[in-house]
């Protein structure tokens, strides 16, 4: 158990993204270089998915044209998913029947 705690990068690497969401993102500023720290922070935010969560939680007004575009994209995604599920189901039925 102690070896797991002694090397957190190896033992907890799979949990790192989950822990970042609870802890927040921390960035060290080296040599008073704030620009580099901001770039690094933005990269970390993109890789952890926080940026998407923030965009999803925005409460500003969405234009009707944007709503239509989003609705169409969601519908296309749903149809694509249903089509894939239908194809997989047909393949599994053929496999089970031995055809």
Image (spheres, helix red, strand yellow):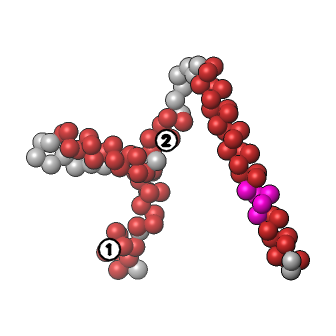
Please report the residue visible at 67 percent of the width from the left and 39 percent of the height from the top.
Answer: 74
86 left or right, relative to 25: right
| Residue 40 image point, x, y percent | 27, 47
48 to 93, vertically: above or below: above
Name the quarter where the C terminus is drawn.
Answer: bottom right
Label 1's element? loop
Seen from this angle, which residue lies furthest right? 97
Q: Which residue is mark 1?
A: 7
Query: Could you give the CA–CA distance between mark 2 and mark 1, rounded to whole angstroms?
Result: 30 Å
Q: Main secondary structure of the magenta part?
A: helix
**On the rendered image, what quadrant is the N terminus found in?**
bottom left
What is the x, y in percent for residue 9?
A: 34, 69
Q: Quadrant of residue 13?
A: bottom left
Query: Farthest residue toward the left?
Result: 31
Determine which residue is flagged by label 2: 52
Q: Are marks 2 and 1 in contact (CB under 8 Å)?
A: no
Label 2 crowd (10 A; few <14 / some 14-19 / many >=20)? few
Q: Is residue 2 above or below residue 89?
A: below
Magenta residue span: 84-88
Q: Quadrant of residue 2?
A: bottom left
In the structure shown, which secondary structural element does the residue marked by tag 2 occupy?
Answer: helix
Q: Nearer the viewer, mark 2 or mark 1?
A: 2
- Which of 42 and 27 lies nearest the eye of the viewer? 42
What is the x, y in percent for residue 59? 54, 25
Viewer-proximal residue, 30 or 64? 64
């Amino acid at each position: 158990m102690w070896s797991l705690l002694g090397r957190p990068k190896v033992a907890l690497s799979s949990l790192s993204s989950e822990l970042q969401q609870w802890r927040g993102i921390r960035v060290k500023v080296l040599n008073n270089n704030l620009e580099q720290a901001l770039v690094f922070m933005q990269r970390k935010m993109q890789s952890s998915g926080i940026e998407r969560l923030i965009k999803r939680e925005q409460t500003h007004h969405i234009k009707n044209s944007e709503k239509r575009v989003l609705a169409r994209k969601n519908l296309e995604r749903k149809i694509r998913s249903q089509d894939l599920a239908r194809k997989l189901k047909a393949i599994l039925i053929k496999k089970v029947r031995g055809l």
